[in-house]
Image (cartoon, helix red, strand yellow):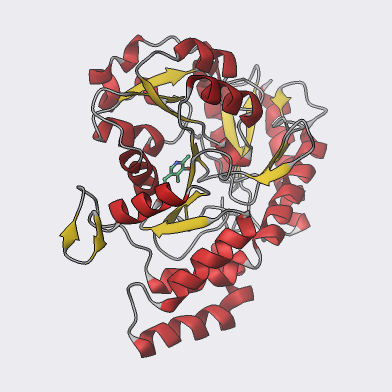
Amino acid sequence: MRNLQMVDLKSQYQKIKSEVDAGISQVLESAAFINGPDVQHFAKELAAYLGVKHVIPCANGTDALQIALMALGLKPGDEVITASYTYIATVEVVALLRLKPVFVDVDADTFTMNIDAVKNAITPNTKAIIPVHLYGQSANMEPLLALAKEYNIPVIEDNAQAIGGTYTFSNGETVKTGTMGIVGCTSFFPSKNLGCYGDGGAMFTNDDELAEKLKMVANHGQKERYYHEVVGVNSRLDTIQAVVLRAKLKHLDEYCAARSAVADYYDAAFSVNPNIVTPYRAPYSYHVFHQYTLQLKNVSRDEVQKKLAEKGIPSMIYYPVPCHKQNMLKEFGSDQYQLPVTDMLQDCVISLPIHTEFKEEDLAFITQNFLKIINQLS
Ligand SMILES: *Cc1c(COP(=O)(O)O)cnc(C)c1O
């Protein structure tokens, strides 16, 4: 059987091995494991790539979101509007800080937050909005930013799945995702579009004052060593991870293009089938396909997954249980929400393998078998 995986990080590593290995070995020789020069170099290089003033590295994407909420000074009970249709980390940090998660539904085509729903959810207690650029596609930021400005609410972008992606405003201006809100957060988890070889994360901002606060919160609440101004956390990017990220950042545009090409291949194969809804690409977004997520109609998803597995084709459900149905969040009244689109999507989505190293023969094998299975079952 073919050795197909959701993500192929081994082949990707082979292509940058000499640079990564040399860089890591230099860190080992210098023993600058924490805050070595590569961390600062990487932060500068990523800032230049994104077109943003400040990049503050941290230990993972979950911390990035938590530190952003802390640095913005949110207080227990403050309401934070976000999508239920996201990875749990987006909402978990809200709950952890004893803020109140307020869920809105998503649009069925883009999987990102519905802007009218956000408008209806705003109250005098709304102190932040967290749009999630899910699966690699930007949320619809222009109307969201206008709304946030009208009510003076900070926007924190969860960019963990969309680094390298862009958003184009109606005046034609195109910017990188994660740079439109007061702060953008990302993850360098290995399988993310820009992933390291362990855990990592970062925050981006154009606001000088906020940048200082983010740095301070990430570093035990201190600006000057051993003088602690606020309660913070300990969240750092390892030097070794920064080495990996510097090597991979140079290829990020290629990686995004390779993912996009896989999506094109899948789209072309599947778009004729009435039981498969291929991912919609919003005209305002350059979709970087962290996931390739289809909606299945009139077929049993369980059966499809079973038959795919028999052929050695992996598939995943992102995410089988939306946040508002997680036990973790019941104490926030999350189970009271009616989010019909989220519920509908949760029952019909399926994600196929997507990564930067595909051979055409593997894509042909996946698409042919997938179509055969759908036709058998429908
Ligand atoms: C991966 C991810 C995170 C969390 O990142 P970690 O580095 O795993 O902590 C947060 N939000 C979304 C949408 C993610 O996909």
Front residue (pair 228, 192)? 228
Where on the picture, by quarter, is residue 127?
Answer: top left
Residue at position x 51%, y 54% from top?
A: 191
**Residue 72 falls left or right of residue 164:** left
Quadrant in which the C terminus is drawn: top right
Q: Position of residue 218 (x, y in %)?
A: 31, 54
Residue 358: tell me if it is visible: no
Residue 198: tell me if it is visible: yes
Front residue (pair 376, 323)? 323
Q: Position of residue 8 (x, y in %)?
A: 58, 60
Which corner quadrant of the figure contains ligand 1? top left
Residue at position x 39%, y 11% from top?
A: 337
Where on the picture, by quarter, is residue 293?
Answer: top right
Front residue (pair 332, 320)? 332
**Residue 341 falls left or right of residue 62:** right
- Residue furthest front as drawn: 209
Q: Position of residue 144 (x, y in %)?
A: 58, 25
Front residue (pair 60, 295)? 60
**Residue 67 falls left or right of residue 368:** left
Residue at position x 66%, y 65% from top?
A: 251
Residue at position x 77%, y 56% from top?
A: 360
Q: Is residue 102 above or below residue 60?
A: above
Q: Is residue 63 above or below residue 139?
A: below
Tally of numbered tags: 0
Q: Is residue 283 above or below residue 47?
A: above
Where on the picture, by quarter, is residue 174?
Answer: top right
Q: Position of residue 94 (x, y in %)?
A: 32, 32
